[in-house]
Structure formats: C-alpha cells, structure tokens
Image: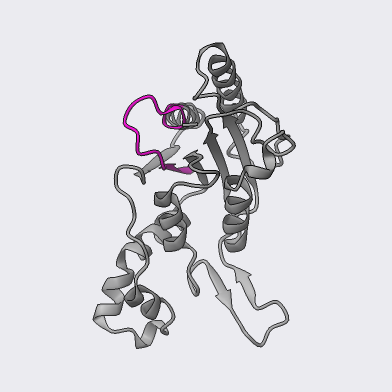
C-alpha cells in the first residue's frame, strides 16, 4: 500500500486550475494500485498558523525538557510531520503569487521543517545539517498567470516557486521533485486551453501504472504556464 499526501494551496474555491489538476492526479494515482490511499490537506481553506515565539522556543528545547505548554505549541506541527512521514508520495497544487508561493504554503513549510524531526543539527559536525526524511517523492503543479516561468523559459528568473520548494524539500530529504506548469490564466482563451491540455497530459504520464510508486527519475518537460 502506498499513501499519497495531497496539498492544495489555492484559496480559490472555483476556477482553480491547480486544484483541478491535483484532484485529477490524486484520482488517477489512487486508481493505479490496489490499496493506494490519499490524505488530503486543504492549506488554502484551512491555512496553517504562522510560527510564534512560543513555537520557536518549544522547537529548540530538548523534547524531554518541554513543558506541557511547549508540547501544546508544537501539537499541530507534530501532526503535520507525522502525516508527512506516513506518506510515500506528495502532490502539491501551488498557484504562483507575486513570483513566489502563497503564504499558506510557506506557513506549512515552516511547520514541517523542524530541527530534531525532519532535520538534525550538529554544530560540531563538518556538515551540521542532516535531512531525516527519506524515500519520498514529490510532484508540484504550479499555476501562473503568464507563460514561460518553467526552468529554461523566458520568465524563469522571476520564478521563485520552484527554487524555494526544491531547496526547502531537499533540505529535509525530499530531493526527487517533479514540476508541472500550467498558465496563461490571465490571457485565457486558446493559450490557456493549450497550457491546461499540456499539463493534463503530463499528469496522465506521471500517474501511469508504476510511474509514481517506483522511485526513478522522470524526464522534465518545459511547459507554458496561474492557478
């Protein structure tokens, strides 16, 4: 049995291309193998809380020395981290807002990148940071208003979604990440439909039998591209 963690970061309840494509990804993937399960977390409609001073103090206190209040401050984060460890594959729906990720997704990342849980820190070591998450693969569906934000595209230098997520996920040990772009949402019409069709075809390829459940590199495809 393989478990998929589905994360939607769009706050839009309708006309969200990333929500549509992520839902199609999850449905096709769950049909691809007996016993496959999906955990869904709606970051767009139920955004994680931002970090607080109490959270930081608790996270950097040795577990055995934490007070009841500290454990309570980390309870939500623990839930997210446990959910992450229990999953084998992640699929994220990410609209690009002002060239970066939505605040809800940034809050989620802040909750799961945790010393002692998803990475370890030894100030005396030659390499002080060690990822603690292994054996997982992530797929990120990015929606943009214009086209050409994919790596190698004419607007790639303005894309701070992919570099940030590769860095943050890789830091905790998820370094096999595949990006799919859809865009031209602000232009609409045929441009948008071509982009959606391309992204839908990539989702079909990536969720074909064996493509997700087996850890192997998948060739990246550039695509035109907003949620």
In the picture, residue 75 is in which quadrant?
bottom left
Compared to residue 69, the image places residue 163 above or below, namely above
Within the image, what quadrant is residue 8 found in?
top left
In the picture, measured across the screen, residue 164 lies left or right of residue 90, that is right
Question: From this viewpoint, is residue 215 visible?
Answer: no
Q: Is residue 82 left or right of residue 134?
A: left
Q: Nearer the viewer, residue 153 or 49?
A: 153
Where residue 178 appears, as percent x and y from the top left, is: 63, 40
Q: Residue at x 32, y 77 (%)?
A: 54
Is residue 117 one of those drawn in magenta? no
The residue sitting at 30% across, 78% down in the picture is 70
Nearest the viewer among 219 and 9 is: 9
Q: Position of residue 66 (x, y in %)?
A: 33, 84
Q: Which residues are magenta?
A: 3-20
Residue 113 x %, y %: 49, 64
Task: Please tell me whether residue 5 belongs to the stretch shown in magenta.
Answer: yes
**Residue drawn 54% across and 20% down?**
196
Q: Nearer the viewer, residue 26 or 141?
A: 141
Residue 31 appears in the picture as rendered: yes
């Amino acid at each position: 049995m393989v478990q998929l963690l589905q994360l939607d970061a769009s706050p839009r309840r309708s006309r969200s291309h990333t929500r549509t494509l992520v839902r199609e990804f999850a449905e096709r993937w769950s049909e691809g193998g007996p016993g496959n399960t999906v955990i869904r977390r709606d970051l767009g409609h139920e955004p994680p809380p931002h970090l607080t001073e109490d959270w930081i103090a608790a996270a950097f206190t040795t577990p055995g020395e934490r007070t009841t209040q500290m454990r309570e401050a980390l309870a939500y984060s623990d839930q997210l981290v446990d959910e992450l460890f229990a999953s084998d594959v992640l699929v994220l729906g990410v609209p690009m807002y002002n060239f970066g990720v939505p605040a809800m997704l940034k809050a989620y990342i802040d909750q799961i990148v945790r010393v002692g849980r998803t990475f370890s820190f030894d100030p005396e070591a030659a390499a002080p940071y060690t990822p603690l998450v292994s054996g997982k693969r992530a797929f990120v569906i990015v929606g943009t208003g214009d086209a050409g934000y994919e790596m190698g595209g004419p607007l790639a230098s303005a894309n701070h979604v992919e570099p940030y997520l590769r860095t943050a996920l890789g830091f905790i040990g998820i370094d096999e990440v595949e990006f799919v772009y859809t865009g031209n949402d602000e232009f609409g019409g045929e441009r948008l439909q071509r982009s959606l069709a391309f992204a839908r075809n990539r989702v079909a390829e990536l969720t074909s039998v064996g493509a997700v459940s087996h850890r192997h590199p998948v060739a990246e495809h550039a695509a035109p591209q907003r949620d």
